[in-house]
Image (cartoon, rainbow, N blue to C red):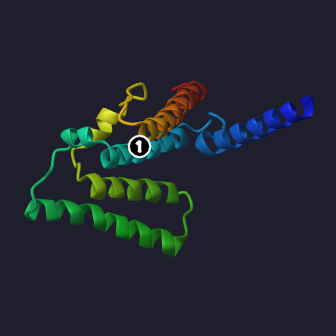
């Protein structure tokens, strides 16, 4: 009985150790923690946009036209150049920025929210919309991870003495 509990505790500590290493390098790298906060927040906003009808109220749509095409070209062109640059020179440190850039692009394509109002509305980790049970559980999971990452960000700032 005790060995089973001990094995569960060891497994939980191993999961937490690996998550801390990946998400913030054990609260030593504030940029990595901020990257994961933004990434989870973007995915959470996309999830909310797709499954909650009320979220469409926060999105300001730009009508199709010349300015929208220029904006899209202005966002896609640097992404293509960054992809080619990383492919040619194989800079692994830029892959994080490339992933962030791609996630922002996916967010803009799915939501068409160029003002980021939905993202800013969804930024508060303590605000939950109870739309349905499955949605609530997934959104609660996102919010708990984001709150933990904000805690790790604060701890990383304290280590850096910023």
Q: Residue 42 in the image: state x and y as whole percent.
A: 39, 46
Q: Is residue 69 above or below residue 110?
A: below
Judge left or right: residue 107 versus residue 26.
left
Q: Residue 24 in the image: state x and y as whole percent.
A: 60, 39
Residue depicted at 29% across the width and 65% down the height: 76
Judge left or right: residue 2 versus residue 143.
right
Q: Quadrant of the N terminus?
A: top right
Which residue is more in the foreground, 149 or 57? 57
Residue depicted at 76% across the width and 40% down the height: 14
How packed mark 1 is, by other alpha carbons closer than 10 Å (few <14, some 14-19, many 20 or more), is: many
Q: Residue 15 in the image: state x and y as whole percent.
A: 71, 41
The quadrant where residue 3 appears: top right
The quadrant where residue 64 appears: bottom left
Which residue is more in the foreground, 131 or 25? 131
Which residue has dot 1 on it?
44
Q: How many numbered circles are shown? A: 1
Q: Residue 94 in the image: state x and y as whole percent.
A: 50, 58
Which residue is more in the foreground, 9 or 86? 9
Q: Is residue 34 above or below residue 158?
A: below
Residue depicted at 53% across the width and 39% down the height: 33
Residue depicted at 35% across the width and 31% down the height: 129
Secondary structure found at label 1 = helix
In the displayed orientation, state which residue is furthest to the front: 133
């Amino acid at each position: 009985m005790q060995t089973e509990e001990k094995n569960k505790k060891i497994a939980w500590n191993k999961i937490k150790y690996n998550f801390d290493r990946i998400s913030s390098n054990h609260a030593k790298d504030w940029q990595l923690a901020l990257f994961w906060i933004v990434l989870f927040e973007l995915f959470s906003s996309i999830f909310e946009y797709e499954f909650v009808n009320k979220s469409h109220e926060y999105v300001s749509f730009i009508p199709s036209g010349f300015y929208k095409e220029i904006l899209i070209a202005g966002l896609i062109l640097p992404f293509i150049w960054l992809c080619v640059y990383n492919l040619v020179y194989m800079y692994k440190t830029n892959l994080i920025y490339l992933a962030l850039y791609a996630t922002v692009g996916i967010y803009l394509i799915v939501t068409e929210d160029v003002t980021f109002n939905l993202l800013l509305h969804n930024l508060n980790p303590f605000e939950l919309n109870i739309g349905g049970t499955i949605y609530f559980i997934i959104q609660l999971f996102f919010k708990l991870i984001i709150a933990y990452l904000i805690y790790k960000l604060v701890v990383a700032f304290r280590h850096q003495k910023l």
